[in-house]
Structure formats: structure tokens, C-alpha cells
Image (cartoon, rainbow, N blue to C red):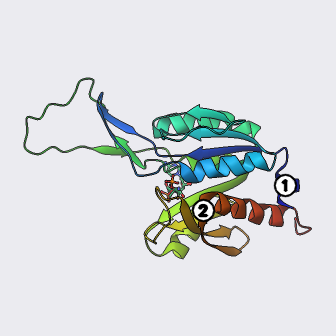
Amino acid sequence: TVKRWWQGKRVLVTAGPTQEPLDPVRYVSNHSSGKMGYALANVLRRVGAHVILVSGPTALEVPPGITCIPVVTAQDMYEQVLRHYPSVDVVIKAAAVADYQPLTRADQKIKKDADEMTITFKKTKDILKTLGEKKDGQILIGFAAETHDVDVYARSKLEKKNLDYIVANNVSSEGAGFGSDTNTVTIYDRWGGKVDVPLLPKEEVAYQILKVVADRHGSPRE
Ligand code: PMT
């Protein structure tokens, strides 16, 4: 069962957006509310897992019994996730990490002099990809937020980042993805399997994800 497999497992969950500062008062971010990641943390706790939640800035309350490490930028998240990686059994990366950060951060507030302004960005480190390269027995579960060709992009991320599972949400479908209380996802695994989860509250979706993992790893196939 789900509980039997997850009980006592050490699980690192990431949630929420990252914020990439431009100057002391402004940042670039995205619409992640953290709900999907916090739902996972909650359900994991309920099935007896030890949860470390690395969370970007959200308005959510940290559920009791969960160790929360607050972070702001993609770089902060990278450092905290890498620090805890050797001591966990499973990583679930529901956070919406910025792919780019402003190349420079102004020390002082940027003034509105020019009519146009150009900001140069540089790529952030891909946390999941780094985890995939350093994998030492951990089960790696990524998320993919897509607006089209979900199947193709999800499978390609699964392979490129050396993941075991990827949970794909089509964020342009009604009631799914960023900010909503519900989600609908497709879970792909590295062995070619695929499970569709219908539109459900995020905690139910979280449970279905845990069930797919428990079914596969708890079965004699492993
Ligand atoms: O927080 P909510 O409002 O509840 O919304 C939930 C959600 C839509 C944010 C969530 O379900 C989701 O899809 N999270 C992943 C969003 C995302 O960044 O997808 P991506 O396809 O850009 O990234 C793929 C994976 O790589 C993700 O697991 C991401 O955490 C990871 N990544 C991305 C960039 C980066 N620099 N490092 C990473 O590890």
C-alpha cells in the first residue's frame, strides 16, 4: 500500500516560485502559489514520511511536522537542495524555478530616466539536472509545466535530467497548474509507463503521485 512504502522515507519537496531581484525593490518571478508542493508535503507527512520542504516565497502556512527551509532565488534553492540531497531517499521538485536571472542586481533602486530599458538575463543552474547527474540511489521526481505538446516535452525532460518520474501539467487547461486548488496531470516514468490523473484537488493529485511510485517500487518488478 501507499503508506507501507512511504512510511519512514526521507523526502525533499520543493515548492513555490523563486524571485530573482533586479534591484532592492523589484524582482522577476512567476505565478506559482506553492499549493502543489505544500499538498505533497502534507500528504507525505500523513503517510509517515519525513519531509524537508524547500520553499520559495508563498502565502501558505507550513504544515505542522514539516521542516521548512525558506529560499528566495533559484541560486538559494540550488544550494539548499544540493545540501540536503545526500541524506534523502526521494526528491519531488514541484517548484517553479526561474530559468533566467537578471545578469546584474543594482545596489540602488533603478530610476525611471530612459523611455525604454533593456534587462539582460543569464541562465540559472538547472537544479534537477544537477541532481540527475549526482544521483546515488535517490528516486527523482520532476514536474513539467507545459502549454503544448506535453507528451513530447515531458518525456524529453525525463530523459535529459535522468529522472525516474515526471509529473506533467498542461497549465493552459482549465483548473490546472498555477494558483488553482485543483490540478490534472500525467505521470510518466522512465520505464515507459504513463498514468493520467483527472482534475482533482491538489492533495488528491499528490496522493495519486505517491501511489504510482509506491505501486511500482513496492512491486516484485523491482
Ligand atoms: O505552485 P502552484 O500554484 O500550486 O502551481 C503548481 C505548479 C504549476 C508550479 C507545479 O505543478 C509545476 O508544474 N511545477 C514545475 C514548474 C516548472 O518550473 O516546470 P518546468 O517545466 O519549467 O521545469 C521542469 C522541472 O525542472 C521542474 O521540476 C522544476 O522544478 C525543475 N527546474 C527548473 C529550472 C531550474 N533552474 N531548476 C529546476 O530544477
Binning the other alpha carbons within 10 Å of mark 2 as few (below 14), some (14 to 19) or many (20 upward) gives some
State the image coordinates of residue 200 (x, y, percent, origin top left). Answer: 61, 67
| Amino acid at dot 1 | Lys
Residue at the location (49% across, 51% down)? 96
Residue 180 percent location from the top left of the image: 49, 59
**Residue drawn at the location 27% of the way across and 44% of the way down:** 120
Q: Residue at x 32, y 44 (%)?
A: 121
CB-based contact (under 8 Å), mark 1 and mark 2: no
Q: Residue furthest top?
A: 107
- The spot of residue 40 in percent (x, y) is 66, 52
Q: Nearer the viewer, mark 1 or mark 2?
A: 2
Q: Which quarter of the rendering shows the N terminus? A: bottom right
Instruction: Please identify the quarter of the rendering in which residue 154 is found.
Output: bottom right
Q: Residue furthest right?
A: 220
Kindly identify which residue carries mark 1: 3
Give the amino acid at mark 2. Pro
Mark 1 crowdedness (10 Å alpha carbons): few <14, some 14-19, many ≥20? some
Residue 161 visible at all: no
Q: Which mark is residue 71?
A: none
Identify the secondary structure beneath mark 2.
strand
Residue denoted by label 2: 201
